[in-house]
Amino acid sequence: MPRVAYADAALTVWQGTDALQFIDGLSTNKVVDLAQGEICRTVFTTSQAKIIDIVTVFHMGEFLAVLSHKSKLENLLLHVTPRILNQDVSISDVTSRNVFGIEYGRQNENIGIFQSIDGITYGHITSSLSFLVASINVKCDFDEVEKAFHQWRIENLVPWNGYELTEKNHPLASGVNELVHPQKGCYIGQEVLARMISRGRQGKMLVRIKNDDVEEKFITTRGETTSLAIVRVRNQ
Amino acid sequence: MDCGTCETSGPVQVMTPEVVNVNLTISNKAQEMLGDAFGDDRSMALLVGVLSGGCSGYMYDLQIVEETDQNCQEVNIDGFRVLVPNASSHLLDGIEIDYVDRLMGGGFRINNPNAESSCGCGESFS
C-alpha cells in the first residue's frame, strides 16, 4: 500500500497526571476519555477559533505521545506552556529521535487505536489513513512520491496541514468537523464554534470541485482536473 | 516510536512567569458571604487559584482549604486567610473578589484587571 514520508511531523511526549485533562481543556475534541492504546485527533484553536495545530494523541499508558507539526510546534508550545501553571504536565520534544510516515488507501478496521508492528507504530486515523512513527534506528522505507498522496487526498476530501489546515481557517471550514465535539466543556475558541454550529452558519466549507468551476484563490490543493477548495457556503 | 522516556530527555523550556506579591481586595458582600462559610473558624483559608481551560484559556479556582501542598503566598484581609499559588500570582495581582447575589449566575466573582477578556459566565479569562 502507498506510504509516504511525513516530513513536517513533530512528536512531543506529555507526561504528568494532568496531561490528558490539560489537552482536553484546550482543544476541540473530547480527549479526556482516551484509554491506553487508543489515539484521538484534536485541534488547538485561538479565541477566534482559528487553527493553531491539529494533533494526534497516542495514549501510551505512562505518558501521551502527541504527533503535531514541526512548522507549528513553536506556536503550539507558546500557546500551551504558559497555561500549565502548577498542573502536573511536562513536555519533551522527541522529534529528532523518530521518523514519520503516512500510509493511505489501505482498508483497516482498527480506527482509533495504534499498533506496533516490527518496531513501527501505526496510528489508524480513519479506515484508509494511518500515521507511522518509528525510531530512527528502525528501517522504514517510503516508496511513493508525495504527489500521489495529494491526489488521493483530493479524491477522498482529506484536509492537510499547510493546505486546508492553516491558521487562516477554523476547523469547520477545513473539513475536520468530526474533531469538534458538540458536547464537551469549554475550551479556547469553543464559543465561536458552538455559535456557528447552533446557528448553522459555519461560513466556509471544504469541497472537492472541478478546476474550471472555482476561482484560483479558493483552491487549497490543486489536482489535475479536480481540486480541494474552501468556499463560502451559500444560503446561510 | 522512540519516546525518549527511557533516557533523560530534556523537557521543553517552559517560560516561568515572575512571581509577584499579590495585592487583592475582598468586597464587603464577599466578606459577609465568606464569614458565613468560615464561621468562627478562621484557621481555614480561601485558596484563589487559576487552572488552564475554559472558553478564554484560564479558569478561576476558588476553594476553602486548611492547607495546600501548592507553593503559595498568604494574604490576610480582615481576618481572612487568602492563599494564592505563586505559579499564578502574575494573573491574580490586583483582583477584587466580589459576590453577586443573583438567582442565576450568582456567587463569588473575580474582577481581574489583568484579564484582556472573559467569557459570559465569568469563570474563564485570558
Image (cartoon, rainbow, N blue to C red):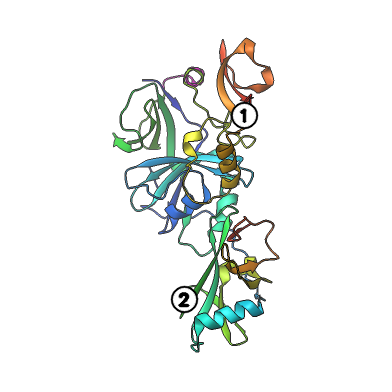
Residue A162 found in image quarter: top right
Write the residue at 59% across / 81% down: B32
- In this view, the residue in front, B79 or A146, is B79
Q: What stretch is highlighted in magenta?
A: A143-153
* Residue B78 painted magenta: no
Query: Could you tell whether B51 is left or right of B93 in the image?
Result: left
Q: Which of B106 and A213 is in front in this view?
A: B106
Q: Where is residue A225 in the image (x, y as percent from the top left)?
A: 56, 10
Q: Which of marks 1 and 2 is in front?
A: 1
What residue sits right under mark 2 in the picture?
B68
Circle 1 sits on which residue?
A204
Q: Residue A72 in the image: state x and y as whole percent.
A: 58, 40
Say what secondary structure mark 2 lies in. loop
Q: Which corner quadrant holds the N terminus of chain B?
A: top left
Query: Which labelled disc corresponds to residue A184?
Result: none
Q: Please state if A56 lies on the left or on the right of A47 as rendered.
A: left
Residue A164 at x, y = what percent? 58, 29
User: Residue at the location (69% across, 63% down)?
Assistant: B114
Look at the image and tell me whether residue A83 can be seen: yes
Observer-nearest residue: A197 or B95? Answer: A197
Q: Which residue is drawn at 64% across and 57% down?
A: B118
**Which chain is disc 2 placed on?**
B
* Magenta portion: prevailing SS class: helix
Three-letter amino acid code of the residue under disc 1:
Lys
Q: In which quarter of the image is the C terminus of chain B?
A: bottom right
Query: What secondary structure is found at the residue carrying circle 1?
Result: strand
Q: Quadrant of residue B78?
A: bottom right
Query: Which residue is depicted at the point 64% across and 44% down?
Result: A48
The local crowd at label 2, few if under 14, some if 14 to 19, many if 20 or more residues have their Cα within 10 Å, is: few
